[in-house]
Image (tube, rainbow, N blue to C red):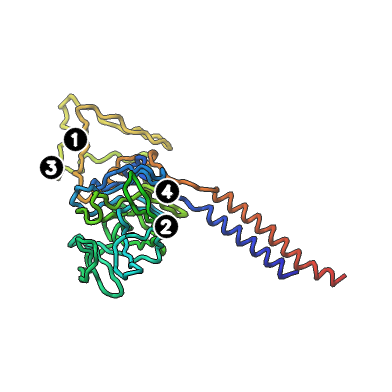
Amino acid sequence: MKRSAVFMISACLAVLLTVFAGAASVNFEDNFSEAVRSDIRIIDPALNTVRRSGLDARDEFQLTLSAQSPINTGFVQYRVTGLENITLRIYSPLGTFATVCESSGILDFGIGTNNSLQPASVMNTYFSLSDRRIYVNHRGTWQVLSENRDFTPQNPNHNTLINMGINAYVSFYANGQRQERHVPLNRTAIRSVFSDGIFMVAEDFQSAGSIPAGVQSLRLEINDPGRNLLTSTGERTSLAWVQLSGRSLRMGPPPAAAPPPITENPPIPDPNVGTNNPTSTPRAATPSQQAPGTGNTPPQETYPKVEGVIIAPPARTANTERPPTQSPARASDVYFSRELAIRPDELTIYEIHREADQPRSALRVIFYIAIVLAVLGYLLLMPQKKRQE
């Protein structure tokens, strides 16, 4: 009796805690069908948005490299904090992997004639940024994909190898591109589809392992050799959608910091400060500094002092007002430069699919746990009372 009761109560507690933990997750999905603020997402000009008919609405709009462009990489970058998991889908003419033909043992690139491949049965291929060729490591031997779409032994420049198709990088800096860390992606699904009469291969990926805490930027990079190496129609690797999740996920810049406290009745600035600077503009002398008998003494600006009340100084006239000095833009402020022009009250938090309010969920779980513990205590004490009687 005791063991069964304890087992049932423990199972109930595990289910409640699991539900409570999952309810706190926040998801953000981008399928490139709508505009997103530039302080949240930036798309590389090298990528074009294409619309593929015959697919699900989620996959219809995609980012891809132009068929005529010699550029072989393009990226989409997100400003994000609290990131814990990345899920995405890409399309390509043949796939981004290598397979071994079961009948002949020949190494092939892409899906080939087998349309029912599983992720565990394929090999990752790598793209070389130096020679724009595709490599695979088969049983310890490096091989390169030739113009005839067959593999021949050749050792690559390992310092320039990246995963073929898609790569993910995170940075601890808001503008990215500094101290980036590569995030491994695991292939979770492969399927062949037809879009506008063209054969394509869809692949799903998910981030492997944990993403470091404190990440502020995510960059997803598409890479493809082009030159009609993979298909005669010019189709290249494209990104269909991205889903980001985390318990404290937030898209865009963090909330603006509170302004410093303002001292009531601030002292009047000393007009003599800065007179030793040869580039400073001379200021008119105060009445106490003018020679006696000069006349036409200009009125001195005064700051009313009222205890407990902050009063702004009078507005300057057009003759005395000086235009604000604008500092030149720095060349390093390339990514997310528009965030400085957005007021804190205009910031938008993209939070999707939050299933429950955390404080209420916590109180509800605590209440359930208290009831379960009370029942458990009653079940444990009841046999003792019977023996005493």
Q: Mark 1 points at which residue?
A: 289
Secondary structure found at label 1: helix
Residue matched to label 3: 279
| Circles 3 and 1 in contact, beta carbons < 8 Å | no
Q: Reading the chain from its start, which is encountered first: label 4 or label 3?
A: 4
Q: Which quadrant of the structure image shows residue 350? A: top left
Q: What element carries label 2?
A: strand
Furthest residue to the bottom?
140
Residue 293 seen from this side: yes
Q: Where is residue 114 in the image (x, y as percent from the top left)?
A: 37, 60
**Whole-percent x, y for residue 235 in the image:** 26, 50
Query: Which amino acid, by three-letter code, is at mark 1?
Result: Gln
Disc 3: CA contacts within 10 A as few (<14), some (14-19) or many (>=20): few
The residue identified by callout 4 is 28
Question: In the rendered structure, which disc, 3 or 1, sits on the residue that comes first in sequence?
Answer: 3
Q: Residues at badges 4 and 2 in contact (C-beta under 8 Å)?
A: no
User: Does label 4 or label 2 sit earlier along the sequence?
Assistant: 4
Mark in the foreground, 4 or 3:
4
Q: What is the CA distance from the residue labelled 4 to the residue labelled 3? A: 52 Å
Label 1, label 2: how many angstroms apart (C-alpha)?
68 Å
Q: Position of residue 118 (x, y in %)?
A: 41, 62
Q: Which of marks 3 and 2 is nearer the N terminus?
A: 2
Query: Considering the image in quadrants, where does the C terminus appear?
Result: bottom right
Q: Residue at x 32, y 70 (%)?
A: 105
Tag 2: Cα neighbours inside 10 Å, few (<14), some, or many (≥20)? some
